[in-house]
Image (cartoon, rainbow, N blue to C red):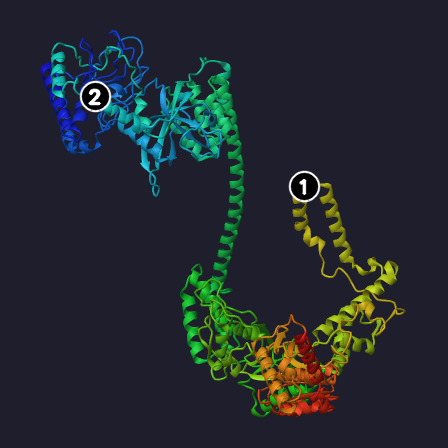
Amino acid sequence: MAYSQWRTVVRTSQGRFRDSLLSAPGKSVTRRFVSSSLNTLPRRPVNVVLSSTSSHISPFNSRPIQLRSGFSATALRSKDQPPEDKDKDIVEEEVDEETEKKEEAKHKAKDNLHLDSGKRPSGSGAPKPKDVLKGGAAGGGHGKGGSSGAAGGGGSRKRSGSDKALQKPTIPEIYPQVMALPITKRPLFPGFYKAVTIRDPQVAAAIQEMMKRGQPYIGAFLFKDENADSDTIESLDDVYETGVFAQVTSAFPVNGEEGSLTAVLYPHRRIKITQLLPKKSGETESTAAVEEVEKEESTEPEIEDVTEEYDERLEKGDVVASFEESVEMPRRSVAAPYATAFLDKFAVSIVNVENVTDEPHDKKDPVIRAVTSEIVNVFKEVANLNPLFRDQISTFSMSQSAGNVIEEPAKLADFAAAVSSGEVKELQDVIESTNIPDRLQKALVVLKKELMNAQLQSKISKDVEAKIQKRQREYWLMEQMKGIRRELGIESDGKDKLVEKFKEKASKLAMPEAVKKVFDEELNKLAHLEPAASEFNVTRNYLDWLTQIPWGKRSTENYSIAHATKVLDEDHHGLKDVKDRILEFIAVGKLRGTVEGKIICFVGPPGVGKTSIGKSIARALNRQFYRFSVGGLTDVAEIKGHRRTYVGALPGRIIQALKKCQTENPLVLIDEVDKIGRGHQGDPASALLELLDPEQNNSFLDHYMDVPVDLSKVLFVCTANMTDTIPRPLLDRMEMIELSGYVADEKMAIAEKYLAPQAKEMSGLKNVAVQLRQDAIEELIKSYCRESGVRNLKKQIEKVYRKAALKIVQELGEEGLPEAKAITEEGKIAQEVSEKIAEEIEKSGDAAAATEKKDVDMEAQTTVEPRVSLEVPASVHVDITKENLKDYVGPPVFTSDRLYDIPPPGVVMGLAWTRMGGAALYVESILESALSHSSRPGLERTGSLKDVMKESAVVAYSFVKGLMAKDFPENRFFEKARIHLHCPEGAVPKDGPSAGVTMATSMLSLALNHKVTPTLAMTGELTVTGKVLRIGGLREKAVAARRSGATTIIFPADNMSDWIELPENIKEGLEGIPVSWYSEVFGIAFKDLDRETAKNLWVKQLKEAEKKKKHDEDD
């Protein structure tokens, strides 16, 4: 291209650049900036470099430099010189493309143009005058079509003779100030890429700006703390001072993390931090720069003038179209900032650095050649063990310019450290080492450790492969064996065999038609499923359950009344009404041939034998027995089962009972039905409605089975302590049989017949002369165990026999019962092994390893029968009587039969029902203060009384006031008395209406000052008119009255039927008096009352109080 044509191209591109800038918003600021930038061109002849592909003028350093024939002293950017005429077409085409790009970016320039601390538009494609480095180093390559910088040195640089329009960017050799990026885990090594994730938005924005400006260079330094996580350096003490000068080759955002990016770094050389610069505020400096430009507006020339001046100087030869020759510019009075000055507006770490050069070394040095050869040999060994290393070594070898890795020992050391996963400190030592032999030694140590890891990994891999190969071999051999057996007809396929097994099991069952249809469908599905399919196991488990239910199978029942009577009498003493009801139930079954549709519920206090009665019924009927408790149950799936789609699904407890019992007619005992819970999984009590309804359970539908199951043959027996908490619909489906507590003579018979023999055998005293006398058992019942059941009595008897066993062993000593005779031969061997291991644990300091060994050898330390029982000599005799009972069970809990031997006026024995059975409930009434004309009447109630009982007290108080006014009008006690009514055992909540008669009698006893006989007990609800109403729990209350020493019991006439049904052993020694009105109770409780004395009882006291009051008034 001729010189005039080249000048035309430059002028055209200058004009477009000027138009694009002046058309943007903020035109005056832009004009001032461009004029100011171009004004830095000296008036004397200078050399200005033009880019062959850029449409911008690229003025560089203002530092004066003498023209030389070789390379310039500060060669900032090496660019191709303008092409010759023969390249005219190429240059024009490139200019046209650049022009089109400028036209497209014209509108974007309006929004993107702004000033930075370097006084240049951030959107510019080439650096401006103040974007050069102080020390003479230029930035690296630009973006698209940008020029590339190179470090300058002495000598001249001749014009290139090539015809290339573009030249590959080079890396500046001197870059004294960079942005520092701290990294963690492992350092970077020159020549090896590394991807890092940057989460600090400021650092990410700075890197993007650097890449946009064509200066993608940073310093990467390793954190000393491996757990540090920051993208900036707060102190030089946080990082190692030696790092690498790296180029950001690419950056892309991180998915899901706004403001973060992943940058790929390519380290070029080692550098060292000399100074960490303080962070600056970019906004303040930018504002100051704008103000400075505005002040100089009047003195700056317009961009047109600058362009004309540039043209004139070009014509005079001031501008030389060459990128290879030096540039001479006058030194400005103010030092120009670094090219990294634009980073001041970002909160990043800027450091001054210096290059770290390797110490001179001789490649032919024997030490270097030996270590290098050893590294190569180690690489070969690692490559044989790890294919990944083989690829990395091949890539590294091909990338070396020398062709032989041994010729570049420094790079070989870096490569060895870069591919090794050594300790952070060891890798950093390789980075910091400038002595090549020393670096090679450190790299060899790191590489040797990598070889050891690779060898260990290879060993583990071979062991695992050997195990897998063994299993695979066994699997293939088994498959071949199965194939041979199938060909010979010896054995069929596993799935076919499973189908045949299910068919065989189903043929023995009398499945209903609906169940048979479902079974055939599921079996057909199983036959077409692959064994590896997940549905295969679900179907197989379902068919397994379907064929394990005893369809049509029933046990032969025994309806013999004599047999049932014998079994019940053997297992239980007393309970005549319960046994009669069971015998009636069996008699009906004998006549009908079945006992379908019966649900029995035993209600009674704990320890009376409800569960054991259920077992006795099963034994009497010859039925299988299954028990499960629903106490606290909150999940409906326990009753109805889980859906088959759930993992680990199971049928409900009823289906499980059928599977276990293998009969359609077992006896299922549902325990604690009154304590059933309710949760977010549903209401189990409602689920029991279908189960316990005779009209519905003939087609019970379990969620898992999903086929109707006939439960009408099952005999359900439920137990409960009380009926109050059982839902009414569920209670309506059950036949209630109440079990009251035992009286003293029943407890005595139970203890002698059942409890004492069982406890004696359990204590190892079956054949020993240990006698628990009858008077001792009576004392236990009377002074230790007054509850309704016999569970506590059983515990006390077991305690007596345990104490007796201890006494015998202590008296005989080791001589009488030697330990060696009790241990069997197998037990002695196991004991020796255990002792030997214990000694090894004590000797060895590693307790964990010793404990593991002990667990491994546990089989040798155990045996089936390690001990045998010892025989006590026949000369030993232990006699337990009432006198020495305290030595076995301690002092008595109850010291008297009743709370009051002789009760004072106002104290009456009542009767109450509790979950533990019946109990004596005393009611006490006292006068709070002396009677006087000024005292006011009132009633105070204490003793943990609930609402119903408080109302009973108010009703009784109103009734006795009316009774006294009617029968004893002269007795004005209730007109002036303030009464305190209390029920002892205040910690026990009390409720119920049956204490009304007792409260009224207590207050009347206080008002009439008359003692009630201590052997009288009463119960009944009282109305305000004196009517005595029906109560519940008469049986338990009668037992409690007899246990408390009462001889007479008053109860409502409406409960006469309950009294008649009471067993004679309970009523023995107890007189029952039914009453309908309180007047009858009054006649019994106060039969020896002197009415005349009662009328005038408080008259004298009130008169004296009145006289005293008048006397006080006269005074």
Q: Quadrant of the N terminus?
A: top left
Q: Nearer the viewer, residue 230 or 817?
A: 230
Q: From where the camera sits, is residue 1111 visible?
A: yes
Q: Nearer the viewer, residue 952 or 102?
A: 952
**Which residue bears the numbered disc 2?**
295
Left or right: where 1034 falls relative to 432: right
Compared with residue 337, is residue 1032 higher up or lower down, i.e. above or below? below
Residue 235's disc is none
Locate residue 779, reporting x and y percent: 79, 76
Compared with residue 474, is residue 707 higher up or lower down, i.e. above or below? below
Locate residue 234, reporting x and y percent: 43, 28
Few, some or many C-alpha atoms within 10 Å of disc 2 (few <14, some 14-19, many ≥20)?
few
Residue 846's disc is 1
Indicate the quadrant where residue 516 lies: bottom left
Which residue appears farthest toward the front when viewing the image? 1114
Q: From where the camera sits, is residue 559 visible?
A: no
